[in-house]
Image (cartoon, helix red, strand yellow):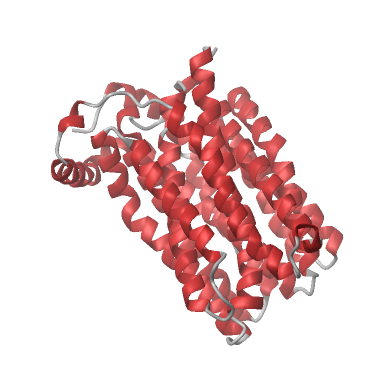
Amino acid sequence: MHDKSSKKQIISWALYDWANSAYATVIMAGFFPVYFRQYWATTLTSQESTYQLGLANSIASLVIVLIAPIIGSIADQSGNKKRFLLFFTYLGLVMCAALFFVVQDDWQLAIIFYIVATIGFSGGVFVSDSLLLTVTDKKNLDRVSAFGYAMGYIGGGILFAISIWLVRSPELIGLTSPLDAIRFSFLLVAIWWAVFSIPVFLFVHEPDKLSVNLSSSSVLFSGFIRLIKTFKSIRQYKIIVTFLLAYWLYIDGVDTIVRMAVDYGLALGLDSSDLIMALLLTQFIGFPSAIAFGYLGEWLGAKTGIQIALVIYVIVVLLAYQLSEVWEFYMLAIMIGLVQGGIQSLSRSLYASIIPADRSAEFFGFYNMLGKFSAVIGPVMIGLIVVLTGSHRVAMLSIIILFVAGSLFLYRVDVEKGRQLVDETKLS
């Protein structure tokens, strides 16, 4: 059972998912691609617009791939993860607000602001993930992690629903067009992110570190040294390495579906408004489903819960290969909503249970590095297959390889042995 103080910390931590998920849903997955094409990039061809947007996503992901382990190591050494969380949060929400002021056809500035905002979002995610071991004990990881993702789904979904309502009725707040309402939603995301991030900074308390009196340069140097040692001695944790390989493969498939689903639907001739509404539906189904998967993880184990989700994802891809009607896209959106939050939350809690708690930011740096690296590779893989085969359906079908390979590596992860090894040994 959690005491009153612990519950306050858990809710405060989960509210950060509520806060920053607005960016992932409203801007990254929802409105930025639409507004970029229809307002900022009107001087570009359709192919050029798609290329620039894809390149922006890859650049932002690549930056996180390079800095996440280093920042994580330094955060552990300094004992002040919340300072890094504040930096990334401020970076992200300021860039969201800045998008509101970008004028028509200035696609270069829009792309720069979007890249920096995405770096802020992604950096905040991995630092927030590392605080999971601060707010709860290992026996409650599955449920608390799932609660965080559920809060993210409902928070992002609420603001997305408000934004869609404004886009459909812009005159209600004195706006003249749907595009103006989309632009206004960027400002709403910044405000939402800022307000609901406050509790994590006020009420989540980090344990004291012996290194807090070190100078900034000493902490930086020590962080680099520690990171190098982790690379050299990671072989002590072969179970962690195996899990990370499994995670990299299957989360590549998950992220590719998230990023390419709308594009896939458009390529098949479906209406964009239906695709946006299906995305919103996924958010609200993801809320109770993420919580349910938390209990499923406690009942059957996080590893089994992930495997169940992977089976459903394979079914989704097989159905998507034959998709032709709008109602089928809605059905797939429902199925994805049932498992997307679950596979993310159980992956986070399983990983947290097999890593050293005193190096959580550093290890979550590696975890998120692989997650973001998949965001670099996955969309490129889909695009290449489309070019080679001329078929979006074949490209979608290829994602099954990632889910099956990830499942096979996950099968080899001995979770109990991993937990025992972490308890018995420490990286030197």
Q: How many marks?
A: 0
- The quarter in which the C terminus is drawn is top left
Along the viewing direction, whichever of 266 and 380 lies nearer the viewer: 266
In the image, residue 98 lies at what x, y percent? 50, 63
- Is 314 placed left or right of 4 in the picture? right
Residue at point 47%, 47% (across, down): 246
Residue at point 47%, 74% (across, down): 109
- Is 175 placed left or right of 6 in the picture? right
In the image, residue 57 lies at what x, y percent? 49, 66
Occupied quadrant, residue 327: bottom right
Residue at point 56%, 43% (across, down): 19
Residue 258 visible: no
Above or below, 17 relative to 301: below
- Is 59 placed left or right of 17 in the picture? left
Above or below, 265 relative to 280: below
Residue 160 visible: yes
Along the viewing direction, whichever of 300 and 151 lies nearer the viewer: 151
Above or below, 259 relative to 8: below
Occupied quadrant, residue 302: top right
In the image, residue 179 lies at what x, y percent? 70, 70
- Is 58 placed left or right of 276 in the picture? left
In the image, residue 414 lies at what x, y percent? 44, 32
Above or below, 291 relative to 24: above
For this orientation, the residue located farthest to the front is 174
- The quarter in which the N terminus is drawn is top right
